[in-house]
Amino acid sequence: MPVPAASPLRSLPAGLFVLICALFMPGAEGHSQSRTITYLDPQEHTNLYPPAGGFYPNGGILSQITDRLTWQDPTTLEIRPWLATDWSMNEDDTEYTFHIRPGVTFSDGSPLDARAVAQNYQTYGKGNPTLHFPVSEAISNFDRAEVIDPLTVRFHFTHPAPGFLQATSVLGSGIVSPGTLQRSFDELGTATNIIGSGPFVVSADIPGKEVDLSARKDYNWGPENRPARAKTDQIKILVVPEDSIRVGALLAGQADIIRQVEAYDEEQIRHAGYSLHAPSTRGVNTGIAFRPDNPLVADIRVRKALLHGTDRQEIVTVLYSENYPLARSVLSSKAAGFVDLSEKLKFDPVLAGQLLDSAGWRRGENGLRYKDGHPLRLGIHISLPHPQNKTMLELVAQQWRRLGVELDIMSGSAAGVLLDNLDPQRTPLTVSEVGRADPDVLKSEFFPKNRDALLQKGGQSNKVQHFQDETLNAMLLDISSRTDRAERLKQVVAVQEYLIDKAYDIPLFEEPQVYATSPNLTGLGFEAVGRPVFQNVELNRP
């Protein structure tokens, strides 16, 4: 198909133009049909075990092929029925009983009943070491699942679990067939191995390149805002890492939806008459977390110096758009329990210098700070899932260099980055962020048995020698088990204040997920933390 002379593709370098032609033109069978949608993601999925759905490419697939017991209204955050028609809990939130919608089946025809639901939650709540399934970070204090009758399941908890109802609505709690849970964790990296009950099924998975989804013709048990069969027949998810190619393909009419539109491309897309969508992730803001087990950042004066020596407003103004509000706390301003801590986050390079002086870090002739002959040199890895992360860290490095602190920005293979990020001596800093519309998100990010962003002793890493903050851990556990909502939110406020008072984290901005869509596309939805929902999407091609 010839490209018109006015096409945005013509403004691309020749190599990119050829690559777009190869990606979209020869093999786009069915793309001209209005019931096929092409969606471009910058990254390939890793693993589709539902509790791994926090990674956005994973979540973008799981959102289409699995259902949950409940759904969370993205506007009101109210928990509503889905696979569960109703539910109840006891007075101290240690037992939850759900009644399952009759007639639901997995895409292989097997029934989605109380037994299947119980097996899913038994796996998510306790893990399965034999098959290498980790415990879900969304579920706290889980004891066991009990089948009451074919359509009734009860969950028991060792301690109160006030966040569990919301946990039943998250992508990490998507229900898969019992047969899927018989496979190993590694096998669930192949999308065709996931059997869910959602409005789409995986029809093809070409590793690193493409995942194809086909609509289930018999689907009729979605939540109230999308109860019936998907409006489109097929979704083609293509992995396109280059920003310019994704944008060029969209503007040329060769793609219908793209994810991770960088701030510098937003104006171009708007000017061309295309739509931008920037749903909030509503959780822990994008920031830089410290690993105090490393002696270079063990001194709170050093951490506070770097907090006050970071010009967060410059970062937001120079690199991002209005879709990236300046962080005013560790938590998003759209999160329950948010408290505005802007006064504690002020940029003050004079104070930062005084704190470093008092901690014994003195400037050398080259402008860097030294102590006992060693430079204040810190390492951090680029986090590819986050927008403009390399450029953002480079700007932070410039700001810290003016303080006399050197920031090494590292990259490497996925395996190497993973190992480095478990070693506080290699990475005294890490990029922090996690989305979830529930106060338990703080525990997900900072508790040692969950993501363990601070790297505590007894947590995810066996390389931590000393650092452990029992006060913080007790506060996080209290959030996950306190049943009085008002008291729970007070503790959420206290944890935010504690994290900033200890200078464990430098919150930078509230991270959205930014998508762009064709003017001919309608019906794109999002769940509560920004994953796309394709069930109501349709094209009206001219």
Image: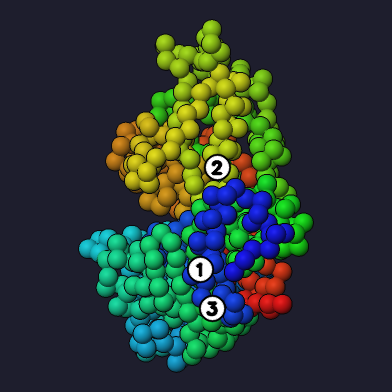
The answer to whether the residues at label 3 and label 2 have Cβ atoms under 8 Å apart is no
- Is 511 displayed left or right of 313 in the figure? left
Q: Earlier in the sequence, mark 3 or mark 2?
A: 3
Q: Which of marks 1 and 2 is nearer the N terminus?
A: 1
Relative to residue 407, is residue 416 depicted above or below?
below
Q: In which quarter of the image is residue 226?
A: bottom right
Query: Residue tagged by mark 2?
Result: 389
- Give me the C-alpha separation between circle 3 and circle 1: 11 Å
Which of the numbered marks, if any, corresponds to residue 402? none
Which of the numbered marks, if any, corresponds to residue 30? 3
Relative to residue 326, is residue 130 depicted above or below?
below
Q: Name the mark nearer the viewer: 1 or 2.
A: 1
The answer to whether the residues at label 1 and label 2 have Cβ atoms under 8 Å apart is no
Give the residue drawn at x 68%, y 56%.
Answer: 8
Circle 1 crowding by C-alpha within 10 Å: few under 14, some 14–19, many from 20: few
Residue 397 or residue 325, whichever sits in front:
397
- Give me the C-alpha separation between circle 3 and circle 2: 36 Å
Circle 2 crowding by C-alpha within 10 Å: few under 14, some 14–19, many from 20: some
Residue 373 or residue 360, whichever sits in front:
373
**Residue lying farthest left?**
130
* Residue 410 image point, x, y percent: 44, 35
Which of the numbered marks, if any, corresponds to residue 26? 1
**Visible residue check, residue 113:** no
* Residue 349 image point, x, y percent: 66, 23
Q: Type of residue at label 3? A: Gly
* Residue 198 image point, x, y percent: 47, 79
Looking at the rendered structure, the secondary structure element under dot 2 is: helix
